[in-house]
Image (cartoon, grey):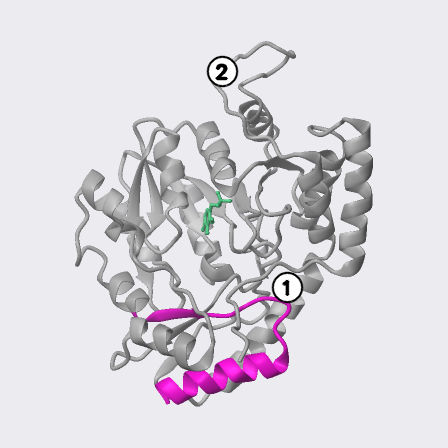
Amino acid sequence: MEMIQVAKPYFTDDDIDFITENTRDVLKSGMLMQGKWVREFEETFAAYCGVRYARAVNSGTSALISALNFFEIEGKEVLVPTNTFLASANAVIFAGGTPVFCDIVPETLLIDFDEIVRRTNEKTAGLVLVHQAGLIPPDLARIRDYCRDNNLFLLEDSAHAAGSSSAEGRAGGLGDASAFSMLATKIITAGGEGGMVTTNSEALAHRATSLRFHGEDHKRGIQDRVGYSWRMTEIQAIAGLTQVRRLDEIVSLRMSVAARYDEGFRDLESANALPLPEGCRNAYYKYPLILGDHLSRPDVKERLEKEFAVKSGTSYWPTCHLQPAYREKYGYAEGDFPKAEHTLNQTIALPMHCHLTEEEVDRVIAAVRAIAG
Ligand SMILES: Cc1ncc(COP(=O)(O)O)c(C=O)c1O
């Protein structure tokens, strides 16, 4: 039985031809960076998200730090859900701030609004809002109003959510800025690595441009601030461009896999899938399934792989606050965020990518039902 993988990028033969031909031209031209392809990728991405500016960088983490640097968070606190990949919080530290974790809503795995309110104080500068697994928070309007009324910046971490949307609009245009990852496993990839900052703020876009090129601001060779080396190459941008042009198709394919899973698990009492609120499109970076308390996540994962040749992931475990680096640095401990700890310890992420066939999805459903049923 062939192993079903959790994630796989989607490049059609046409896209591979396009990338190959144009890569050859780029290599011959000698213009390997900061050229027309990066510009076109940025313009196409900004238009897709419905914002004025997009700036390509080398990773999602750099994209987050670019925005956080602009928000000037030195000595300040930034709220981050404890359910995210650690980079969302690490970026706050790299930009000079302190991440303050928040517990989650068990049904959606997203940040709990009451926690945002509870943990806001005079030091709080803003919020990193993670569209975890691709789902845009159903209470986004309330979160946005709260941030506006309390003078907090709202930075979307859209690493999981390229192409996701809700009644409020598309990921990338829902806050003051947004950061995307284009790592190989993400919804779209710029050839294996990459990131994008999107915003309507000209000043923020300018800051991202400066930071990615060693802090150059107005004049070539003059560094006005201490910057980084975070550029995206032309070859990466060619690959990324094919992906964003195909993003609606990619999201539709992922949504049909999710719909089949939803149907397959609808009557299963021992596991719950996430809701898809009316009018939302979810890019489903992951398909999380919350297992009943009588099941052990590690056992289920092991049996899926060994007995049924199905790989699975988590979404996320351990939570950020239980990662050794954070326990040590900030003294977090078990019991600090009970809802996240309980729910995420029971959550697995099933295979989710555009190449999955209906037979493979059915194989995954049957495997889960055999173990959890
Ligand atoms: C939620 C989230 N934020 C940020 C990142 C960081 O992106 P990158 O690995 O491209 O730096 C990732 C993934 O890696 C992520 O899953």
Picture quarter with the C terminus: bottom left
Tell me the residue that label 2 is attached to.
225
**Residue 20 image label:** none
* C-alpha span from label 1 to label 2: 39 Å
Q: Would you identify the image quadrant in which residue 7 lies?
A: bottom right
Q: Residue furthest front?
A: 1
Please, what secondary structure does the residue beneath circle 2 have? Answer: loop
The 10 Å Cα crowd at callout 1, few under 14, some 14 to 19, many 20 or more, is many
| Residue at x 46% of width, y 70% of height | 311
Identity of the amino acid at label 2?
Answer: Arg
| Residue at x 50% of width, y 80% of height | 364
Which residue occupies the foreground of this view, 346 or 108?
346
Q: Is residue 244 above or below residue 352?
A: above
Looking at the picture, how far across and down is residue 78, in whole percent? 34, 39
Q: Is residue 260 visible?
A: no
Looking at the picture, how far across and down is residue 109, in whole percent? 38, 63
Tell me the residue that label 1 is attached to.
251
Looking at the picture, how far across and down is residue 358, in whole percent? 62, 81
